[in-house]
């Protein structure tokens, strides 16, 4: 019976530059029975550009519950459906999670068709640490809730990634500076892959002033990347240097024990630091 079920494709679309639609994504969009799109008018222009005539149905936050049930019925009947958002990878601050979860629970194949994602594109070019990061989506719209959300992440050592809209970018940057610290390094990315693409790095306080200084810098959708909090290790710089040298040749446990013997520092602190440093 499962062989009769359809496939749900989660298809990434360009965030600006139309050349970023992959050949596979274009093929899938041509071959499926229907495309579930966040904004059918917006997506119709994209499909027209690529000569894709597949029928579109609206799938957005206001009809997600009803439409999910309808699409699941079609998938159970063997139809192939592509899910797209207005731009980038679906479900990343966009509708689709209930549909994907329900499809998987019902044994329907869900297949990702990767492509553009503003958060990852910004991170890759930001110059901030990219080995560990947190995607926090859009901050709350009210100042008190926004500051509370930032406060919950204040001590997180990972790079923090937020989306923000033009009319709230200044307020968000000012709140970030107040909560994370005015001198915390950060990067503002806007209009990614488009003609006026900009990635600008500075302290949070300086970034708030930089955006405010030019009305053109308030245009477009924003990704804000904030350097993680400094890691409090309780290990001095020389002991860390010794530990790094030993880690290049020894397993974590041995390196920490030997570093403790050499430096006189506590073994537990060195072991915890070694776990963070070891690739």
Image (spheres, grey):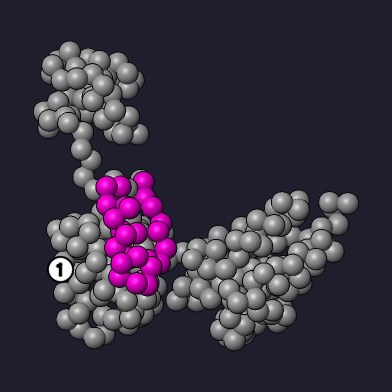
What residue is rendered at 51% in x and 73% in y? 87
What residue is rendered at 55% in x and 63% in y? 91
Residue at which label 1 appears: 206
* 12 to the left or right of 232: right
Within 10 Å of disc 1 (Cα), the crowding (few <14, some 14-19, many 20+) is some
Task: Give the x, y percent position of residue 1.
Answer: 88, 51
Task: Judge whether 60 appears above or below 115 on screen.
Answer: below
Disc 1 secondary structure class: helix
* 208 to the left or right of 102: left
What residue is rendered at 24% in x and 66% in y? 175
Is residue 206 visible in the rendered image? The answer is yes
For the C terminus, the image quarter is: top left
Decide which of 122, 203 is in the foreground and name it.
Answer: 203
Q: Which residues are magenta?
A: 132-156
Q: Residue furthest right?
A: 1
Task: Judge whether 230 appears above or below 172 on screen.
Answer: above
Is residue 200 visible in the rendered image? The answer is no
* 276 to the left or right of 90: left
Task: Judge whether 63 appears above or below 246 on screen.
Answer: below
Task: Give the x, y percent position of residue 192.
Answer: 37, 72
Task: Give the x, y percent position of residue 191.
Answer: 36, 76
Q: Quadrant of residue 77?
A: bottom right
Taking the magenta stretch, the answer to whether it contains residue 206 is no
């Amino acid at each position: 019976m499962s062989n009769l079920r359809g496939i749900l494709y989660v298809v990434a679309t360009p965030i600006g530059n139309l050349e970023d639609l992959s050949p596979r994504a274009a093929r899938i969009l041509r071959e499926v029975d229907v495309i579930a799109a966040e904004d059918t008018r917006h997506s119709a222009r994209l499909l027209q550009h690529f000569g894709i005539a597949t029928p579109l149905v609206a799938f957005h936050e206001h009809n997600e519950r009803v439409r999910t049930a309808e699409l699941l019925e079609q998938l159970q009947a063997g139809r192939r459906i592509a899910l797209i958002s207005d731009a980038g990878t679906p479900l990343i601050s966009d509708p689709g999670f209930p549909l994907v979860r329900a499809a998987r629970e019902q044994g329907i194949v869900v297949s990702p068709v990767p492509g553009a994602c503003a958060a990852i594109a910004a991170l890759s070019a930001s110059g901030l640490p990219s080995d560990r990061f947190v995607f926090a989506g859009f901050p709350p719209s009210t100042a008190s809730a926004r500051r509370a959300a930032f406060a919950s992440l204040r001590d997180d050592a990972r790079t923090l990634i937020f989306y923000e809209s033009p009319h709230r970018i200044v307020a968000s940057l000012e709140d970030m500076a107040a909560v994370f610290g005015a001198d915390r390094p950060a990067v503002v990315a806007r209009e990614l892959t488009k003609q006026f693409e900009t990635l600008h790095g500075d302290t949070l306080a300086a970034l708030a002033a930089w955006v405010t200084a030019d009305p053109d810098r308030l245009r477009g959708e924003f990704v804000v990347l904030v350097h993680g909090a400094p890691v409090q290790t309780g290990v001095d710089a020389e002991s860390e240097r010794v530990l790094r040298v030993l880690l290049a040749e020894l397993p974590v446990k041995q390196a920490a024990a030997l570093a403790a013997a050499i430096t006189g520092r506590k073994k537990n602190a060195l072991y915890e630091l070694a776990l963070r440093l070891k690739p």
